[in-house]
C-alpha cells in the first residue's frame, strides 16, 4: 500500500494491444459448431442488431477490447484514488481478527469450564437418584413401621372406649379397631402386602407378645358386653305389643357389626345369640299369627255345611210351617257372586282386626286366608332380609328354623279348617290365592316359602276333590221321590247345578296358567264332565213322568224339574 500511495494518479497507462490477426490467418479455421454459435447469436439482441446493420465483427471486437481496456484502467485509477480507505479497511480487518482471536480463546475457556460443569451435573444427578432411592426406602419403612405400630399399640382411648362406652357408634368404631388389631396379631401367613419387607410374623415380635394379652382381655370384655346387649334386645321381642320390625331395625341391624365380631372372635357366643333369637322370634311370630288367626276365624261366615250338596232331600229345604220348598235357602256354596273379587286384592294390606271388629262384618274363609297369606309373605320377606343381613346366613337355615312353628301352625289350622269344609268354590279360590302369593314371593326373589305353598296345595286339592265327589255322589244316588213334586218350575237341584257349574267354569279360566305339578286342573276337567253326565242321567229319569209333549218341552226349558 505504501508503494501505491506514491504513484502518480495522472500517469498514462499505455498497454499494448496484441494483434493476432496474422497468427489466426495462419491457423486452420475450424467451422465445427458454427451453426450452433450462429443460432445462439441470432437470439442475442445486440449481435442480431449488429449483423442486421452489416457491422464488421472484427472491428466490432477490437472496439470492445479497447473499451474493456479503458474500463480496466479506470478501475485501477479508482482503486489508487481510494487506496487510503483501503489501508484503513485493512487495519480494521486486522483489528477484528485480533478481537476474534481473543473471543476464540475466551470461548475455548468457556467450553472447558462447561465440560467441568457437565461432569459436576452428572455427579449431582447420580447423588439425587441415590437420595431419592433412600427417601423411598425410608418412606416405605416408615409406612410399614407405622402400620405395625398402629396394629400393635393399644391406646388408652381404645381401652376406655371398649370398657366404659355404651353400645353406640363410638363403641362400634373402637370395636372395629380392636378387631383389626386382633387379625393383625393372629396373622400366620407371611403376606408381603401386609408384612412388607419385615419378613417376620407379627405374632413373633416382642411388641406383639406384650400387646396380645391386653387385646385378648379387651376381646373378652367386648364379647361379654355384646352378648348382654343382644340378649337384652332379643328379650324385648318377646314382650306383648312390641314393634318387632322397629327393634330389628334400630336395635339390631344398626349394630349388625356386633354379630360379625362375635362370629369372628367368639363363634360359640354367636351361635348362642342365633339360637336365642330363633327361639324368641319363632315364638313371637307364632304367637302373633295364632292370635291373629283366632280373631279372624271369629268373623268367619260359614258358607256351606255337609248338607249343602247339589242333590239333597227336599225336606232339608222346606219351611217349618209349609209343605213347599223355601227358596230363600239359596245355598251360596254354589253361587260365585262377587267372591272372586278377592283375587283383585292380592296386594292390598291384611285385614285390620280393630276395624273389622268395629264393623262387625262376617267374611268367607277365602277372604280370611288372603289376609293371613298376605301377612305371612310380608313377615317372611322382612324376616328373610333381616336374617341375611344380620346373621350373614345365605343358606336359609336360620329363617326356616325361625318360621318352623309358624308354618306348622298354618298347616295345622288349614287341616282343621278343611276337615269341616264343604265349600268347593272357597277351596278353589284358596288354591288360586296360594298360587298368587307364590308368584308374589317369586317376584321378590325369596324362595323360602316354596315348600310351604307345596304343602298347602297338597292339602287343598284333595279336599276340593272330596267335595266334588260328594256332590257327584249326591246326584248319582239321588232318589226322584225324595227330590220333591214334579212340576214345571225350576227345581232347586237344577238351580244348584247351574250355579255351581257356572262358578267353576268362571274360576277355571285362571287355572290353565297355574303350574301346579299335581294334575289338579286335569282332575277338575274330568270331575265337571262326570258331574254333567250324572245330571243328564237324572234328567232322563225325571222326564218319563210326563205324558204331553208341551209338558216335556216346558220341563226341559225350565231346567228339567
Image (spheres, rainbow, N blue to C red):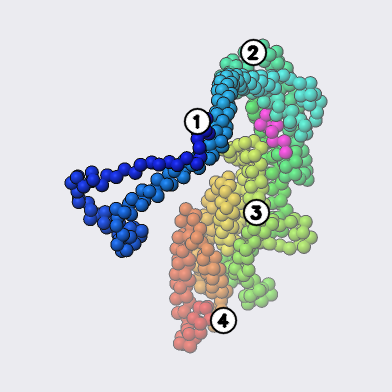
Name the residue nearer the viewer: 558 or 129. Answer: 129
Give the CA separation, mark 2 to mark 3. 60 Å
Give the CA separation, mark 4 to mark 3. 45 Å
Dot 1 crowding, Cα within 10 Å, few <14, some 14–19, many 20+: few
Nearest to the eye among marks 1 and 4: give it: 1
- Looking at marks 4 and 3 on the same chain, the residue that comes earlier in the sequence is marked by 3
- Give the image quarter of residue 159: top right
Residue 527 lies, in percent from the top left, at 47, 63
Kindly identify which residue carries mark 1.
Answer: 3
Kindly identify which residue carries mark 3.
Answer: 374
Residue 53 lies, in percent from the top left, at 32, 63
Name the residue nearer the viewer: 220 or 280. Answer: 220
Kindly identify which residue carries mark 4.
Answer: 489
Residue 446 lies, in percent from the top left, at 58, 47
- Looking at marks 1 and 4 on the same chain, the residue that comes earlier in the sequence is marked by 1
Residue 77 lies, in percent from the top left, at 49, 42
Bounds of the magenta segment:
254-261
Nearest to the eye among marks 4 and 3: give it: 3
Asked if disc 4 and disc 3 are in contact, CB closer than 8 Å, the reply is: no
Asked if disc 1 and disc 3 are in contact, CB closer than 8 Å, the reply is: no
Q: Is residue 334 above or below residue 463?
A: below
Q: Is residue 514 left or right of residue 361?
A: left
Q: Is residue 342 left or right of residue 478?
A: right
Label 3: which secondary element: helix
Name the residue nearer the viewer: 218 or 142. Answer: 142
Nearest to the eye among marks 1 and 3: give it: 1
Kindly identify which residue carries mark 2.
Answer: 205
Nearest to the eye among marks 4 and 2: give it: 2
Amino acid at each position: 500500500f505504501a508503494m501505491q500511495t506514491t504513484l502518480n494518479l495522472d500517469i498514462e497507462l499505455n498497454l499494448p494491444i496484441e494483434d493476432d490477426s496474422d497468427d489466426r490467418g495462419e491457423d486452420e479455421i475450424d467451422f465445427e459448431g458454427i451453426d450452433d454459435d450462429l443460432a445462439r447469436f441470432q437470439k442475442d439482441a445486440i449481435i442480431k442488431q449488429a449483423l442486421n446493420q452489416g457491422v464488421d465483427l472484427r472491428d466490432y471486437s477490437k472496439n470492445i477490447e479497447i473499451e474493456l481496456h479503458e474500463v480496466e484502467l479506470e478501475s485501477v485509477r479508482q482503486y489508487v484514488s481510494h487506496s487510503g480507505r483501503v489501508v484503513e479497511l485493512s487495519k480494521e480487518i486486522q483489528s477484528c481478527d485480533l478481537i476474534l482471536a481473543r473471543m476464540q480463546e475466551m470461548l475455548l475457556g468457556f467450553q472447558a469450564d462447561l465440560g467441568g460443569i457437565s461432569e459436576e451435573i452428572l455427579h449431582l444427578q447420580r447423588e439425587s437418584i441415590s437420595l431419592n432411592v433412600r427417601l423411598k426406602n425410608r418412606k416405605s419403612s416408615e409406612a410399614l413401621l407405622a402400620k405395625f405400630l398402629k396394629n400393635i399399640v393399644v391406646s388408652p382411648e381404645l381401652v376406655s372406649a371398649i370398657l366404659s362406652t355404651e353400645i353406640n357408634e363410638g363403641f362400634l368404631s373402637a370395636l372395629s379397631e380392636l378387631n383389626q388389631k386382633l387379625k393383625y396379631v393372629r396373622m400366620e401367613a407371611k403376606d408381603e402386602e401386609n408384612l412388607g419387607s419385615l419378613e417376620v410374623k407379627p405374632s413373633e415380635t416382642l411388641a406383639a407378645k406384650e400387646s396380645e394379652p391386653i387385646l385378648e382381655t379387651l376381646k373378652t370384655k367386648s364379647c361379654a358386653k355384646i352378648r348382654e346387649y343382644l340378649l337384652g334386645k332379643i328379650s324385648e321381642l318377646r314382650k306383648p305389643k312390641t314393634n318387632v320390625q322397629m327393634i330389628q331395625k334400630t336395635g339390631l341391624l344398626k349394630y349388625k357389626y356386633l354379630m360379625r365380631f362375635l362370629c369372628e372372635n367368639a363363634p360359640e357366643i354367636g351361635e348362642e345369640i342365633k339360637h336365642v333369637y330363633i327361639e324368641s322370634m319363632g315364638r313371637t311370630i307364632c304367637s302373633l299369627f295364632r292370635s291373629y288367626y283366632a280373631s279372624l276365624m271369629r268373623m268367619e261366615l260359614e258358607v256351606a255345611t255337609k248338607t249343602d250338596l247339589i242333590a239333597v232331600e227336599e225336606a232339608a229345604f222346606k219351611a217349618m210351617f209349609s209343605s213347599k220348598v223355601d227358596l230363600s235357602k239359596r245355598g251360596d256354596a254354589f253361587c260365585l257372586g262377587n267372591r272372586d273379587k278377592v283375587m283383585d286384592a292380592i296386594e292390598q294390606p291384611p285385614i285390620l282386626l280393630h276395624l273389622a271388629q268395629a264393623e262387625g262384618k262376617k267374611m268367607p274363609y277365602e277372604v280370611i286366608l288372603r289376609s293371613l297369606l298376605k301377612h305371612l309373605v310380608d313377615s317372611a320377606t322382612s324376616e328373610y332380609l333381616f336374617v341375611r343381613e344380620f346373621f350373614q346366613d345365605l343358606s336359609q337355615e336360620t329363617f326356616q328354623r325361625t318360621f318352623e312353628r309358624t308354618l306348622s301352625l298354618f298347616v295345622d289350622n288349614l287341616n282343621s279348617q278343611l276337615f269341616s269344609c264343604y265349600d268347593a268354590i272357597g277351596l278353589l279360590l284358596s288354591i288360586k290365592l296360594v298360587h298368587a302369593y307364590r308368584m308374589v314371593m317369586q317376584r321378590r326373589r325369596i324362595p323360602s316359602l316354596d315348600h310351604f305353598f307345596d304343602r298347602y296345595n297338597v292339602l287343598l286339592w284333595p279336599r276340593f276333590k272330596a267335595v266334588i265327589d260328594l256332590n257327584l255322589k249326591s246326584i248319582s244316588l239321588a232318589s226322584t221321590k225324595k227330590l220333591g213334586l214334579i212340576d214345571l218350575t225350576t227345581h232347586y237341584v237344577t238351580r244348584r247345578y247351574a250355579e255351581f257349574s257356572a262358578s267353576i267354569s268362571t274360576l277355571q279360566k285362571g287355572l290353565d296358567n297355574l303350574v301346579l305339578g299335581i294334575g289338579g286342573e286335569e282332575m277338575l276337567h274330568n270331575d265337571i264332565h262326570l258331574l254333567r253326565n250324572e245330571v243328564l242321567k237324572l234328567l232322563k229319569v225325571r222326564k218319563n213322568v210326563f205324558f204331553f209333549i208341551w209338558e216335556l218341552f216346558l220341563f226341559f226349558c225350565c231346567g228339567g224339574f
